[in-house]
Amino acid sequence: MSDRPALNQQCLPPHDVSPLKLPLKRNFGKQVIFLLETSQKGVLNLRQVCTLESAAGLNPEVSIILVFSDLEQISSKDNPAMMELLENSPNVKIATLSSSEAFKGTPFEGIDYRMLKNSSDFKVHSSDLLRLSLLWKFGGMYMDLDYITLRSLSLLLRLKNFLTADAEYNINNSMLGFERHNPFLWKILEHLQKNFNPEIYTTAVASINAAVRETFKIDIQEAIRRVEIDKQLYVLNYLVTSPVKYVDCFQVYAGACSPRGTEGNGASIKEFLR
């Protein structure tokens, strides 16, 4: 029996519908990039839609899957920009998945969900656990819903098993990729289950860094410097994921990015990037 949970694929008509349960691999192909929305509001802002659009446009052969967690319905009327994107980008798909189903069969079943729910950073922690669970069960790549893709991600997808850093001394979890049932990824899951602390914002990031140190007997700065720390695991420096500083992003996108849904309504680039 497969441990893959059934993601509910949502191809939304212009009204609210209950999602359909469809097995992921059969419908989304082999190359997959996951993104998560865990606010449980079911609404994307313009920057998030642009994240999807930029990733989809530069990676037309890759399935871009946005997963809404713990939602049964998503309002199409509240998501006009997202709806337009779905109509024009066939490789963008929407799915829903319950946290309990995602955690089933992983060490995260041992985390007290009530403790997680009461966390002051529930949205962040829920997303941290879900992204790791998705990669364990399905394999693929994960990226945060606030990235703007500047070039094809084919090289990252080709690496298959990689982590990324946000500084010279810290690995984060905003972008990562693993093959399904990767043994090192399981070690990360186990470490996080044992050390999960709902009071610490970066509890998942701490476990990823600890797992690297303990498994490969190497400090994080050296792991980032080496890039390849194992024949099948890479640690990429922050310039891979953040080549443009936030303070410079207005200059990069001003006049070059026309987010769907902004035409004619006076929305400025600052409002879009907010």
Image (cartoon, rainbow, N blue to C red):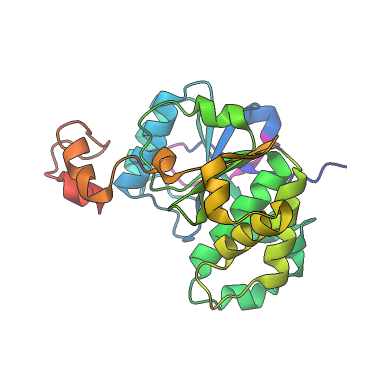
Question: 91 or 133, which lies in front?
Answer: 133
Magenta highlight: main SS = loop
* Total marks placed: 0
The answer to which quarter of the image holds residue 266 is: top left
Above or below for 239 versus 166: above
Which residue is painted at 48% across and 77% down in the image?
120
Above or below for 21 versus 153: below
Where's the N terminus, which quadrant?
A: top right
The answer to which quarter of the image holds residue 259 is: top left
x%, y% of residue 232? 69, 35
The magenta segment: 13-24
Q: In the image as oriented, which residue stretches furthest toward the right?
A: 1
Which residue is painted at 52% across and 25% down in the image?
154
Which residue is painted at 52% across and 21% down in the image?
61
Above or below for 3 versus 203: above
**Residue 23 magenta:** yes
Q: Is residue 243 visible?
A: yes
Where's the C terminus, which quadrant?
A: bottom left
Q: In the image as oriented, which residue stretches furthest toward the top?
A: 61
**Residue 35 magenta:** no
Q: Is residue 22 visible?
A: no
Which residue is painted at 64% across and 52% down in the image?
132
Viewed as shown, does residue 193 lie left or right of 43?
A: right
Question: 269 or 69, which lies in front?
Answer: 269
x%, y% of residue 106? 77, 57
The answer to which quarter of the image holds residue 105 is: bottom right
Viewed as shown, does residue 108 lie left or right of 270?
A: right
